[in-house]
Structure formats: structure tokens, C-alpha cells
């Protein structure tokens, strides 16, 4: 059922009671739209005619979405470099591999850098993906220097004439200042070889408002260019993409909807809003 179905059906059925309005607002908040955004939609609904509500809500939601480009950067004349950042546990490493899979399907030549050196499992996971996708993976030793891995990956990508360099980074948010310093160092060493074109922040869509708080922490410290929302497979509540774009101004560029390599796609904002408002 569309997120706003309850609101639309109540309005079409007559004048909602105060209890109805409270119920509708609570359902919107529980769908991760956020308290402020939910209250704004309720205020809008109370002002418009019942036969205008769907269009009015759709226009409001569309206005909340980021206007920044959603397409992934591409520089045919050189390597396009993408850093994938985010808190451990959000699906960051898997998203890095899925992005590689998507680019491979477009006949792009890719080098993958395993710069999350503080988790041996992340290195092994990327190496397994690399074998599966037939993509070279540059990795170092566990607990080694992430910047050194990133530099080696950039050097290899340039030497191989790769189209894209995708680098998975560490995500230890509990050591925020150290992590951000580390990400800054990774970026600086890459830029000795080639520019960094995208910094994609991975957010677990099921974490709701906590995901927005995490996003803000990274955005304050790293030049994030876009978002990847993971676990948008039905377990996620529908309003999170709206809430996070309105709160941060950043575009969701990709969504992950499952565990497989193909469960990953560019974010279609029009289809998303239609899905929220059309039964």
C-alpha cells in the first residue's frame, strides 16, 4: 500500500476527525518521513480539497527532493574515481561491489580498492566479489594503511587505463575524528594520481532517523556528493529517501534492494514519489 493511501482514503471518505488526523500523522512519522515533514503534510491536507490532495501532496514531495544531478560522474578522458563511505554495517562493502557490477554491465573497465583495512572480512568480501565479477582488486594487509592501498589502487587504475576506480573505505564512526582524518588522507593520496569525482555515502534505509544523523556526521566532515540507500527491499519504511534528501540537500543516486549483484539500481525519483502516492 502506498505511504499516503490512508491519508487519501480518509479525505475521500469525508471530513477526518481529530483522531483520524492523529492516526494519519503517526503513520507518516512511523514511515520515517520525520515529525516536521509529517506535520507539514497534515497541514497541507487540511487546506486542500479532497479531489486535489494527491496532486498537492505529489508536488510537495517532489519539491522536497534534491535538485542535484543523480547520474554518476563520468570522465571519458581519464579515470573517474568514486569513494564509498559510511558506517560499518550499512552495506558499504557490498554496495561498492554492486556498483562495480552495474558499471561492468555498461562495459566499463574498473579497478576496485579494498581500503577498509580494519576489517579483514571486508577485504576478503571484496576479493571474492572481484573474482566473481572478473575485476582486479587492490588490497593490503589487515590493519594496514588505508591511504597506501588507495594510492596503489589509483596507480594501478591509471596504469591499466581504467574507466572507473571504486574504493571501499573504513567506517568506524565511534572514532569520528580519526575516521574523518583517515578519509581526508585517503582522498589526498588519491589526488596525487587522479581527482576524486564522487564520494557516495551509504545509508541503511531501515535505520530511519538514525540514518539521517549518521549522514549529517559524514557530510559535516567529508565532501559527500550523493547517497546510496541500502535495504530498500520492503523492510525499509517509505519516507526515508524524502526525509534524507530534504534534510541534507544531497541526491540519492542508487538504491540497493537485496543481496545479489543485480539488486542495485539508479534511484528514480519520479517513480519513487509515484509509489508513495499512487495506490
Image (cartoon, rainbow, N blue to C red):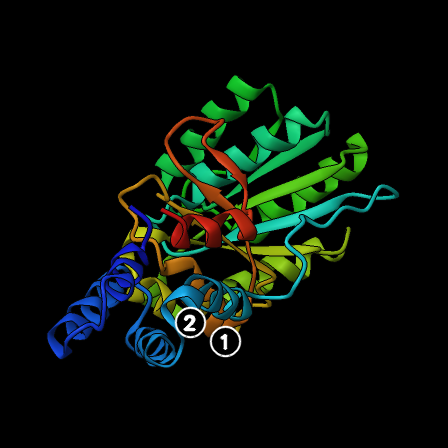
Dot 2 alpha-carbon crowd within 10 angstroms: few under 14, some 14 to 19, many 20 or more: some
Q: State the SS at label 1.
A: helix
Determine the CA span between mark 2 and mark 1.
5 Å
- Label 2 element class: helix
The residue that label 1 is drawn on is 220
Residue in the picture at 42% in, 26% down: 260
| Residue 60 image position (x, y, % from top left) | 49, 70
Label pair 2/1, CB-CB below 8 angstroms: yes
In the displayed structure image, the side of residue 2 where residue 201 appears, left or right: right
Question: Residue 155: x and y, percent?
Answer: 74, 41
Q: Does residue 113 appear to the left or right of 142 in the view shown?
A: right
| Figure check: 194 above or below 139 | below
Is residue 253 in view from this perspective? no
In the rendered image, the residue lying farthest to the left is 19
Give the image quarter of residue 15: bottom left
Residue 213 versus residue 171 in the image, above or below? below
Seen at 76% across and 46% down, the residue is: 74
Q: Position of residue 221 (x, y in %)?
A: 51, 73
Q: Which residue is mark 2?
A: 217
Amino acid at each position: 500500500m502506498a505511504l499516503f493511501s490512508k491519508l487519501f482514503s480518509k479525505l475521500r471518505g469525508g471530513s477526518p476527525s481529530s483522531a483520524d488526523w492523529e492516526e494519519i500523522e503517526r503513520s507518516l512519522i512511523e514511515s520515517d518521513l520525520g515529525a516536521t515533514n509529517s506535520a507539514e503534510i497534515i497541514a497541507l491536507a487540511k487546506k486542500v480539497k479532497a479531489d486535489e490532495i494527491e496532486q498537492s501532496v505529489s508536488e510537495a514531495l517532489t519539491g522536497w527532493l534534491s535538485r542535484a544531478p543523480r547520474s554518476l560522474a563520468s570522465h571519458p578522458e581519464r579515470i573517474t574515481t568514486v569513494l564509498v563511505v559510511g558506517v560499518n554495517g550499512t552495506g558499504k562493502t557490498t554496495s561498492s561491489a554492486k556498483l562495480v557490477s552495474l558499471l561492468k554491465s555498461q562495459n566499463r573497465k574498473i579497478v576496485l580498492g579494498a581500503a577498509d583495512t580494519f576489517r579483514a572480512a571486508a577485504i576478503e568480501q571484496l576479493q571474492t566479489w572481484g573474482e566473481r565479477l572478473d575485476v582486479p582488486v587492490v588490497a593490503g594487509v589487515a590493519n594496514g594503511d588505508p591511504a597506501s592501498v588507495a594510492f596503489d589502487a589509483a596507480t594501478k587504475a591509471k596504469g591499466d587505463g581504467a574507466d572507473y576506480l571504486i574504493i571501499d573505505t573504513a567506517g568506524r564512526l565511534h572514532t569520528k575524528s580519526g575516521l574523518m582524518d583517515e578519509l581526508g588522507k585517503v582522498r589526498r593520496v588519491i589526488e596525487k594520481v587522479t581527482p576524486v569525482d564522487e564520494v557516495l555515502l551509504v545509508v541503511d534505509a531501515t535505520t530511519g532517523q538514525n540514518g539521517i544523523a549518521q549522514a549529517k556526521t559524514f557530510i559535516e566532515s567529508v565532501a559527500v556528493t550523493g547517497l546510496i540507500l541500502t535495504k530498500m527491499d520492503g523492510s525499509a519504511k517509505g519516507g526515508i529517501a524524502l526525509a534524507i534528501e530534504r534534510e541534507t540537500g544531497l541526491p540519492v543516486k542508487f538504491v540497493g534492494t537485496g543481496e545479489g549483484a543485480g539488486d542495485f539500481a539508479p534511484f528514480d525519483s519520479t517513480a519513487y514519489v509515484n509509489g508513495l502516492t499512487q495506490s
